[in-house]
Image (cartoon, rainbow, N blue to C red):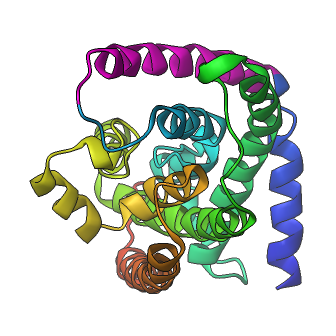
Amino acid sequence: MKSYLSFFKLRFSVGLQYRFAAIAGVLTQIFWGFMLIMIYEAYYRAGIETPMEWAQLVSYVWIGQSLFAFTYLGYKDKDIIESLVTGQVSYELVRPSNLYWFWYIKLAAGKLASSVLRFIPMIIIASLIPGEYGLNAPPTFTALILFIITLLLGFILSIAILMIVYILLFYTVSSRGLFNIATVITDFFAGGTVPIPFMPIALQTICYALPFRLIMDLPFRIYVGNIGTTEALQSILIQIVWIVITTLIGSAFINKATRRLEVQGG
């Protein structure tokens, strides 16, 4: 356990060094956030019936942009990808540690470091935007606590799902196609492209049957007050179940993949 904790600290400190990338990310999220708000404003001003209040939608957009790196399911770790392409992964298998949890810690530390550098400035900037275009606080203290709990559980779930994607790289030549497909599918069904309440009922049913909405849609809508306490508590149990399922699937996949691993030239 100490070795995993030490490795997490190392990867986290390394990730914090990419400050210029974080600044570029913050500027991108601000621009993207304003663009989304302007698009939605056109619908709201047209008098179309909407499933979320305007203030809730604006906060949903800003909290999503602030936590983009934290919830993004297309995160790429160049070291892991390179180790699979070059065959370096064979050396990792002889280490006195579990490869699944070794990669899990690496992905978690990298995502968390990237999130810390972006989250604080984004929250400050979004909160200082005047009028109806700024980020609002959660409606109640209970909503804030439930938001934090579901966000952390969603982060754990996102790493477990990411691990499945990385394990599938054992069976591919290039990572680009797999990551493109996985990113589009997960982001859409997580509510990252369009908030799930705005989708047709049939699509909402599919989203609720998949685990992806538990990473973005659930904590974001709890934050803005669109999901009540009862549904939030029920969803926490569902999050835990999906964490267990995806972790077991990932562990089984990596054991199967490494059992028959062949490295060319080695």
The residue at 34%/15% (across/down) is 45
Any magenta on residue 39? yes
Prevailing SS of the magenta stretch = helix
Q: Which residue is outermost to the left?
A: 202
73 part of magenta stretch: no
Choose between 223 and 166: the one closer to the eye: 223
- Residue 134 in the image: above or below residue 192: above
The image shows residue 143, relative to residue 2, as above or below, that is above
Q: Left or right: 227 with respect to 89?
A: left
Q: Position of residue 200 (x, y in %)?
A: 14, 46
User: Does residue 129 lie above or below 245 as drawn?
Assistant: above
- Count how many numbered circles sit on residues in the image: 0
**Residue lying furthest front in this view?**
47
Q: Nearer the viewer, residue 237 or 92?
A: 237
Residue sitting nearer the eye, 173 or 178: 178
Q: Position of residue 244 (x, y in %)?
A: 47, 86
Q: Is residue 26 visible?
A: yes
Quadrant for the N terminus, please.
Answer: bottom right
Figure quadrant of residue 132: top right
Q: In which image quadrant can residue 179 be found?
A: top left
Find residue 116 and report its horizontal and vertical position in percent.
80, 43
| Residue at position x 40%, y 66% in the image | 164
Q: On the rendered structure, is 92 left or right of 3?
A: left
The residue segment tinted magenta is 20-48
Q: Position of residue 248 (x, y in %)?
A: 43, 86
The residue depicted at 48 percent of the width and 85 percent of the height is 237
Q: Is residue 182 visible?
A: no
Q: Residue at x 52, y 81 (%)?
A: 233
13 relative to 245 in the view: left or right: right
